[in-house]
Image (cartoon, rainbow, N blue to C red):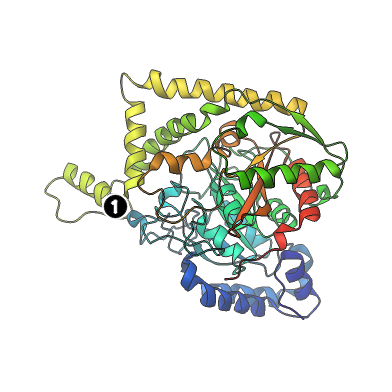
Amino acid sequence: MSVPTNIREITEAIRGGHTSAVEICRETLARIEQRDGDLHAFLTLEASAALERAADLDRRRSDWDRLPLLGVPVAIKDNICTAGVRTTAGSRLLEHYEPPYDATVLERLVAAGAVPVGKTNCDEFAMGSSTENSAFGPTRNPWSLDRTPGGSSGGSAAAVAARMVPLALGSDTGGSVRQPAALCGVVGLKPTYGRVSRYGLIAFASSLDQIGPIATNVADTAATLQAIAGADPRDATCTLAEVPDFAAALTGDIRGLRIGVPRSLLADGVDPQVTAAFDNALEMLEREGASLVEITLPHNQHAVAVYYMVGTAEASSNLARYDGVRYGFRAERSESLARMYERTRDEGFGAEVKRRIMLGTYMLSAGYYDAYYVKAQQVRTLIRRDYEDALTQADVIAMPTSPTPAFPLGERVADPLQMYLADVFTVGASLAGLPSITVPCGLSAETLPIGLQLIGRALDEATVLRAADAYERMARYSRLEPAC
């Protein structure tokens, strides 16, 4: 039989006796060894531990029916804590940090039978849109090695796109799951804020951060969300709402579904190929029985500015803990405690992280707090209300995931404003705390993936997944693979 590559194929093959969890793990590690030299998607591999875990699963046959992710290899973004395994957040400051505990999402994946195989590259402290801000070098896009995979979860997206693993976890603060998934031609979901526990996620912006899955198809995305979602007493922001059966929502039937389209947002700065793919996707959805509804999001034009005010202010606060005293990197030969603090942060943080800390500190400082941070929070409320109002007229909102296909590595490094605009279509859902998914919807003339984004009501991931699954069945772009 062919090598199983998705959750259903892997679990059925193991349960049917056609393969074993150990064999699946070995094949996965072999693919990583073969392909990752060019891509640099992984920072740390856990080969021995993964094989031991797979062997344990093979011995526990009586448990198999209770393990929905039986033997499924999974990659973990390197800002998600793994007990005893290096967790760097892409930063020199945490280059040798080994957490004493597992993140809740990792505990839940393992409890569901998944096999973590390694940690993936990311922009430092998840701050970036290209994975070029990693202290350990950039990840490359499997579709074209001179292009960015997106960020900050670029390593996870590239690993899935290159079929090194069928599944990965990323984190999404302003688009860091969806944008790299779109640029790498895979599926990425940002759940409702609070749907998935953040316990064990190294914080960037605590009112925005959310962990989400990246997979090759919508069904695997839904199955992963099923495994990791739900209340967690260790995260006070985690919702107590019941977790529905997401797989049951994948009916393929979208008759009567109302899709809101904010046409005014697509007027400027969008690559014509992205617009064409987006329009074609809407036509396909309409032919299947969905109806298109014109909506407006009048304050969304301010979303990028608001995001970079709120996000940097929270980053300034969260990253104050990295002082060289308790854990992580400490500068040597400092003549005083104050000088040690200064040198540790100067030598440990990269340029983009320093930029955001300075921006955030400025906005929180006396005389500027009301003018910038408070005002940004007020506009954030207006943005959230815009989305809530639009979602009374529509069941989901559709827009491109990224305004362009993957851009060349190095093209925007010296122009942070252009880099920030890569998130223009994703930050709105983050600020509003809404679930949002990207699914492949086409290829550019240079054979680079284009993503369709669908945004839903709070805690209504089921409808978002249903619409994405129906489109995926029609378009089948998710079946395309890069020639890496």
Quarter of the image holding residue 448?
bottom right
Residue at x-position 46% and y-position 55%: 408
Quarter of the image holding residue 237?
top right
Q: Is residue 171 left or right of residue 439?
A: left
- Residue 212, compared with residue 383, is above or below; it is below
SS of the residue at dot 1? helix
Q: Quadrant of the N terminus?
A: bottom right
| Residue 219 on image: x %, y % | 75, 56
| Residue 216 on image: x %, y % | 67, 60
| Residue 476 on image: x %, y % | 76, 58
Quarter of the image holding residue 9?
bottom right
Residue beneath disc 1: 348
Q: Quadrant of the C terminus?
A: bottom right
- Residue 188, compared with residue 321, is above or below; it is below
Residue 313 visible to the viewer: yes
Residue at x-position 34% and y-position 21%: 368
Marker count (numbered) = 1
Q: Nearer the viewer, residue 193 or 126?
A: 126
Q: Is residue 351 left or right of residue 63?
A: left
Q: Is residue 250 left or right of residue 327?
A: right
| Residue 284 on image: x %, y % | 80, 46
Q: Nearer the viewer, residue 448 or 121?
A: 448
Q: Is residue 222 left or right of residue 360?
A: right
Q: Nearer the viewer, residue 269 or 257?
A: 269
Residue 230 visible to the viewer: no
Q: Residues within 10 Å of mark 1 (few under 14, many from 20)?
A: many
Q: Residue flagged by tag 1: what amino acid is it?
A: Gly
